[in-house]
Image (tube, grey):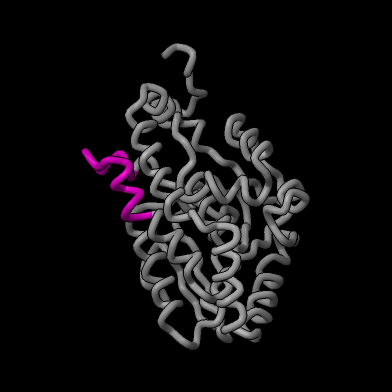
Amino acid sequence: MSESESLQIDFHQGVLNLIIYRPKVNALNLELIAALQSAFQRALRDEQVRCVTLTGSGGVFSAGQDITAFLQEEDIPIRYHLLRTYNPLIMQMRHLEKPILAAINGMVSGAALGLALACDLRIASDTARFVVGFNGIGLAPDSGVSLLLPALIGLGRASEATFCNTPISAQQALEWGMVNRLASADDLPAQTAAWAEELARGPLRAFGLTKRAFNKAVLPNLEQALDYEAHIQEIAGKSQEHREGVRAFLEKRPPKFLDI
């Protein structure tokens, strides 16, 4: 069953499966973000849901925010956009006291990288690629990436991946601790389902308390970090660099930041 054309939802053996469906690159828009928020609210309230999986349709997890859709929201400050979309969604995911397993089936970047990193566990296709993306259009990281990425792979690696916008391969992601497991593209759905069903059979109360403890120990300032990201992004969004980055993206060319 599905609550939105852009989010396919299936429930099986205690597992709520969420599949992002916006071909070709599963870019995120307001409708999809609202559907994800609704789905995680269902996961919170429904006692039959014991685990959640999140993946993308086709060969892409998600390219992140749909820039074209965002540009259509005239006069909407970026800070306001983040405060009603990604910030509450990331907090929902971290506060859900049930395991969330991301199945990274292909490229993931930008805000979608934040969603993947906010999950408790990640299994990736061996062909997956991770791209931070924000600096490429003159923005700073948001959606929790500024906190979650350095927490997982270290500040130096996170800085290089962000500044240089260099894709991180699936193998690198495994070696650096960004993902827990790898699978072939063909085996990824089956391995994801098996792992999710194993989690769903586990001690849910203990899982929830463990997640609460990890949040306290490792991510105690997540809400403040998200709020500061929104503040920083509002500044970046008004810059000439961002305008050039968006123009370059729409014109499918490299940005010319030196000309600014």
Q: Which x, y percent locates residue 244?
A: 40, 23
Q: Which x, y percent locates residue 200?
A: 61, 82
175 vs 4: above or below: above
- Residue displayed at 69% across by 77% down: 194
**Residue 75 in magenta stretch:** yes
**Does residue 147 appear left or right of residue 105 in this picture?**
left
Which residue in the rendered view is the most extreme toward the left? Answer: 75
**Does residue 21 appear left or right of residue 162 in this picture?**
left
- Residue displayed at 34% across by 36% down: 234
Looking at the rendered structure, the number of numbered marks drawn on it comes to 0
- In the foreground, 208 or 3: 208
Image quadrant in which the C terminus is located:
top left
**Residue 105 in magenta stretch:** no
239 vs 6: above or below: above
**Does residue 113 appear left or right of residue 248 in this picture?**
right
Q: Quadrant of residue 13?
A: bottom right
209 vs 232: above or below: below
- Residue displayed at 48% across by 17% down: 256
Q: Quadrant of residue 74?
A: top left
- Residue displayed at 36% across by 40% down: 231
**Does residue 34 appear left or right of residue 129 in this picture?**
left
Instruction: Provide the residue span drawn in magenta.
Output: 69-85
Q: Which x, y percent locates residue 152?
A: 65, 51
Image quadrant in which the N terminus is located:
bottom left
- In the foreground, 10 or 116: 116
Q: Quadrant of residue 76?
A: top left
